Image (cartoon, grey):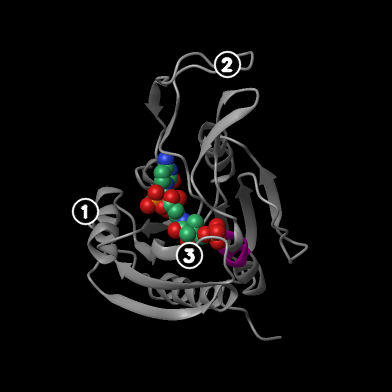
Amino acid sequence: MTELPLSGRKVLVTAGPTYEDIDPVRYLANRSSGKMGFAIADAAAAAGAEVQLVAGPTNCQQQHAGIVRSDVRSALQMLDAVLEKLQGVDVFIACAAVADYRPARLASEKIKKSGTRMQLELVRNPDILATVAALPQPPMTVGFAAETCQVEAHARRKLQQKNIHLIAANCVAGGQGFDRCDNRLLLLYADGRQQDLGLQSKSALADELIQVIATELRAGLLATATP
Ligand code: PMT
């Protein structure tokens, strides 16, 4: 039997948005349907990997029966689920659109309207990808960058700040990227290489990304910005 590119490898993927509750009827979120992340989980499973998927609120369904899925709501829940599942993971792919901030306080009852303005105090959420990358023996770390301008420059900054191996940059200006069946990914590697995967269906992009990851793992070329 032919060996698949990720046979024997464990892959952990995050997908979808996180919801940060304000009160029982309102929340803050970043845009994300989950389609890109679910396509990656499916592609990794098709490539022979043991796949765990941590999904924020989404209507997506994984195609491969072997994928072990955990559903979460908030960034804090996503962080807990990721840290709990990291044991033995070879590759962590962070495709989720995690809310950077959450309300400082969760109101137990629906907040009533009063006046024409209201102020909401927000606190920073932990960075899940950077937390994983900072572990003493991190897996290969693959991030995404959703940008509306200067896509390459902003993505490269994130690659360096989060100290990860690879980042897939996508432009989300003008209706691109979110909740569509296609996307365009520019891959930026920590060692300076880059590769434009072009505009394709999310499933074709996911297949290509998984091939890239398998090649990097085989070659052991896992440089980060600060080794
Ligand atoms: O879900 P779709 O509708 O198919 O759309 C796909 C997508 C555009 C959402 C996806 O391709 C994408 O770009 N996902 C990342 C979106 C994002 O929030 O990027 P960011 O630039 O804010 O974050 C950079 C990286 O850090 C990401 O890998 C993110 O998962 C991670 N991160 C960010 C904040 C945080 N608190 N924790 C994190 O792990």
Q: Is residue 204 visible?
A: yes
* Residue found 65% across the figure and 71% down from its top: 48
Cα gap from disc 2 to disc 1, whole angstroms: 46 Å
Is residue 40 shown in magenta? yes
Quadrant of residue 227 within the rendered picture: bottom left
* Residue found 22% across the figure and 70% down from its top: 192
* Residue found 62% across the figure and 13% down from its top: 108
Regarding mark 3 in the picture, which secondary structure is present there?
loop
In the image, is residue 205 above or below residue 149?
A: below
Q: Which residue is mark 1?
A: 226
Question: Depth check: 154 or 52 in front?
Answer: 154
Q: Is residue 208 left or right of residue 227?
A: right
Q: Which residue is mark 3?
A: 177
Q: Which residue is mark 2?
A: 111
Q: Is residue 138 visible?
A: no
At label 3, which amino acid type do we have? Gly
Cα gap from disc 3 to disc 2, whole angstroms: 33 Å
Cα gap from disc 1 to disc 3, whole angstroms: 30 Å
- Relative image position of residue 54 (x, y in whole percent): 61, 48
- Relative image position of residue 135 (x, y in whole percent): 38, 42
